Image: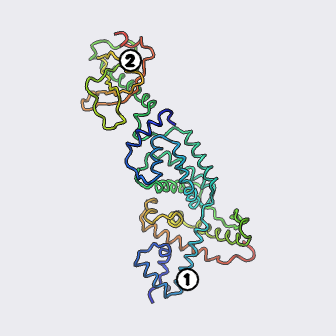
Amino acid sequence: MFPGSEAALMDEGIASLPEASAQDPLAQLVRRIRGGEAEAFEPLMARTEARILALAWRILGDRHLAEDAAQETFLRVFRSLHTYRLGEPFEAWMIRIAVNVCRDLARKRGPLPVPLDLLDVLEGDAASLGAEEAVLLQQRRALVRQALAGLPQAERTALVLRDLEGLSTEEVARILGVRPVTIRSQVASARTKLQAHCARLTTPPQGGRP
Amino acid sequence: MTPHVLKHLPLWIEGDLAGTESAAVESHLAECPACLEAAEALRASQARLREAMASPFDASDAVRLRCSVMDQIRAEPAPRPILHLASRPALLTASAAALLLASLVWRFERGRSVHSAPPPAPPPTSAALSAEPDPKPAPTESRSALRYETQARIRPASRHGTESLPSGMPARIEFQTADPTIRIIWLAQATPPSEPSSTPEEKS
Ligand SMILES: [Zn+2]
């Protein structure tokens, strides 16, 4: 990207940047990218893309939208890398951007499409599992996704970050810019609603579907 | 029997309660089948949540995403590197040229009365600039990236140097404003004049 000057940039730049946590391999990549070596963004993506894709899908509930969100997230990360403070956890910074992107996309798209029809959510598992087992699995998944689709966006995001991304309450609070007590209340509410929704249909529906 | 703990279960189930609260819930669950049943239902529902929300993406999705993003990144102008302005010759030369032109015009407009000689016939351009080696040792730079072999100072138009900067050598340019407390220091990549015969230095 900077013909003829990359070596000089690396030599001069890295030594003069503030101390980053040496044990964080992402921090090393970030320094190289900030030094002008845009190609170092590729290994950085390779380490983080699966997480960002999954996160976006969990928040948005839609595969294609999640792919759009992940793409937009990485572009924003690249373009705003100069605002990242070395030393702060890079993945948390990235997740905050991803959450904001998802929020923007969700606002544009409107309410979540609720996956009501079991047949719509049947995916590739049916072939590898026994037919009956696969149907039950898909049924369980559809129930959970229905429940999530019915949650307020803030509760859903808090639940995703806390229970599916495995972040601590304090980390989630920092990422979302709210107090930890708010996160506790949101995840408690979301877990309760999810359980109540699944309890309504613990037995497979017999007979016709509406 | 201790009080029911139903309202604490959603936090207890994922370890979100403090130690003492958690112990209280557990001792109640040991003696209350109703609360225990609710706790088991919550545990099952949390397990379903993780099962249902396992990522649907595989490695090929990730690679597709990466290629698409990298294509866009390569196509767009590079972001400004941090702290590395001095090591980007193209940008530096362009910025320096703009500043020099601006400062010369400023001199030209403001400095007519102090010139002992009339201004050069052709309007000054960056090629008309001259610089002389700094007579004093170069001030020590705190940043090692700013060490240069040649330190030069652009003098006011009334003093013409006799030496042009060696081509391709970065130079330090100091521009003293009317306010003695303000001095603009710029690093520049000097380029040889394209038409040397038209510059005042060549005439002298
Ligand atoms: Zn009880």
Along the viewing direction, whichever of A23 and A57 lies nearer the viewer: A23
Q: Earlier in the sequence, mark 1 or mark 2?
A: 1
Which residue type carries mark 1? Glu
From what the image shows, is residue B185 above or below residue B16?
Answer: above
Along the viewing direction, whichever of B139 and B96 lies nearer the viewer: B139
Along the viewing direction, whichever of A123 and B183 lies nearer the viewer: A123
Point 28% across, 27% down: residue: B176
Position of residue A198 in the picture relative to residue B85 (left or right):
right
Which residue type carries mark 2? Ala
Quadrant in which residue B125 is drawn: top left
Residue B127 spot, x, y in % from top left: 41, 19
Mark 2 Cα-neighbour bin, 10 Å: few <14, some 14–19, many ≥20: many
Q: Chain of mark 1?
A: B
Residue B13 spot, x, y in % from top left: 50, 75
**What element does badge 1 sit on?**
helix
Q: Chain of mark 2?
A: B
Q: Which mark is residue B37?
A: 1
Point 43% across, 28% down: residue: B93
Residue A185 spot, x, y in % from top left: 46, 70
Counting labels gives 2
* Residue behind label 2 places its C-beta within 8 angstroms of ligand 1: no
**What element does badge 2 sit on?**
helix
Q: Which mark is residue B128?
A: 2
